């Protein structure tokens, strides 16, 4: 699926290379929730210099933080693969869960049962009002990739945009080498 099918949680939005909006330039966004009222997603490839231990939460983790999006950047969100161990979590895909009880996450970190390979933290989120995201996709503002939840916990989030395009194959894979500024090419 690239532009027309209905979105579902777990879909990845990939910004086309010509997107200039600094909030979404060369981003990959995981759709966590998509309803008739709107959509909620987390940018997967905007790693921050700050770490979880820099937050006043006493989680005892030095895991990196990512910028989840430009909306409410003072809020903390997390994705994990510990659905059965974290209460009040929302299943996004078979392996990926969103949110839940922070005390359960704290315990997983204390006993070293969670690592950046299965637990990621985000400040802020990406949000769209009813119909807004569909309109953006229809106008070519996003490519959509389904069924690649393993990319959520990628070892190299900063290279995720190119990896996701390559997974799409065909003409999309060719965009991997699209220059940052085509005018200077």
Image: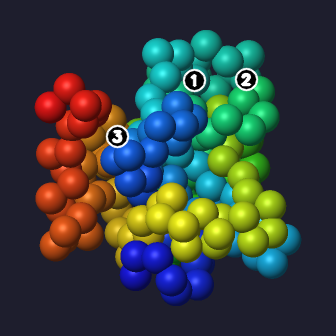
Binning the other alpha carbons within 10 Å of mark 1 as few (below 14), some (14 to 19) or many (20 upward) gives many
Disc 3/disc 2 C-alpha distance (Å): 24 Å
Q: Which residue is mark 2?
A: 57
Q: Is residue 144 left or right of residue 59?
A: left
Disc 1/disc 2 C-alpha distance (Å): 8 Å
Which dot marks residue 127?
Answer: none
Q: Is residue 182 left or right of residue 91?
A: left
Mark 2: which secondary structure? loop
Q: Is residue 7 left or right of residue 34?
A: left
User: Could you tell me which residue is drawn at 34 percent across and 40 percent down?
Assistant: 157
In the rendered view, tell whether residue 176 sits above or below residue 62. below
Q: Nearer the viewer, mark 3 or mark 2?
A: 3
> Where's the C terminus, which quadrant?
top left
In the rendered view, tell whether residue 66 sits above or below residue 130. above
Mark toward the start of the polypeptide (3 vs 2): 2
Mark 3: which secondary structure? helix
Mark toward the start of the polypeptide (1 vs 2): 1
Image coordinates for residue 89, horizontal then vertical, percent: 70, 62
User: Could you tell me which residue is drawn at 25 percent across and 31 percent down?
Assistant: 183
> Where's the N terminus, which quadrant?
bottom left
Looking at the image, do the residues carrying marks 3 and 1 touch, with CB atoms under 8 Å apart? no
Q: Nearer the viewer, residue 23 or 75?
A: 23
Which dot marks residue 52?
Answer: 1
| Residue 173 in view (yes/no) | yes
User: Could you tell me which residue is drawn at 78 percent across and 34 percent down?
Assistant: 72
Q: Nearer the viewer, residue 44 or 108?
A: 44
Image coordinates for residue 111, horizontal then vertical, percent: 50, 38
Disc 3/disc 1 C-alpha distance (Å): 16 Å
Which dot marks residue 157?
Answer: 3
Mark 1: which secondary structure? helix
In the rendered view, tell whether residue 184 sits above or below residue 3. above
């Amino acid at each position: 699926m690239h532009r027309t099918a209905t979105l579902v949680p777990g879909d990845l939005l990939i910004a086309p290379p010509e997107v200039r909006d600094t909030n979404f330039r060369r981003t990959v966004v995981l759709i966590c929730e998509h309803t008739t009222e709107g959509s909620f997603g987390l940018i997967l490839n905007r790693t921050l210099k700050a770490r979880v231990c820099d937050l006043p939460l006493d989680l005892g983790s030095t895991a990196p933080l990512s910028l989840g999006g430009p909306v409410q950047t003072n809020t903390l969100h997390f994705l994990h693969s510990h659905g059965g161990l974290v209460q009040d979590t929302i299943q996004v895909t078979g392996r990926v869960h969103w949110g839940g009880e922070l005390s359960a996450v704290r315990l997983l970190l204390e006993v070293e049962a969670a690592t950046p390979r299965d637990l990621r933290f985000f400040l802020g989120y990406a949000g769209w009002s009813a119909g807004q995201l569909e309109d953006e996709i229809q106008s070519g503002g996003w490519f959509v990739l389904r069924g690649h939840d393993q990319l959520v916990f990628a070892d190299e989030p900063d290279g995720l945009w190119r990896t996701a395009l390559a997974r799409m194959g065909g003409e999309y894979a060719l965009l991997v080498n699209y220059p940052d500024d085509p005018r200077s090419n």
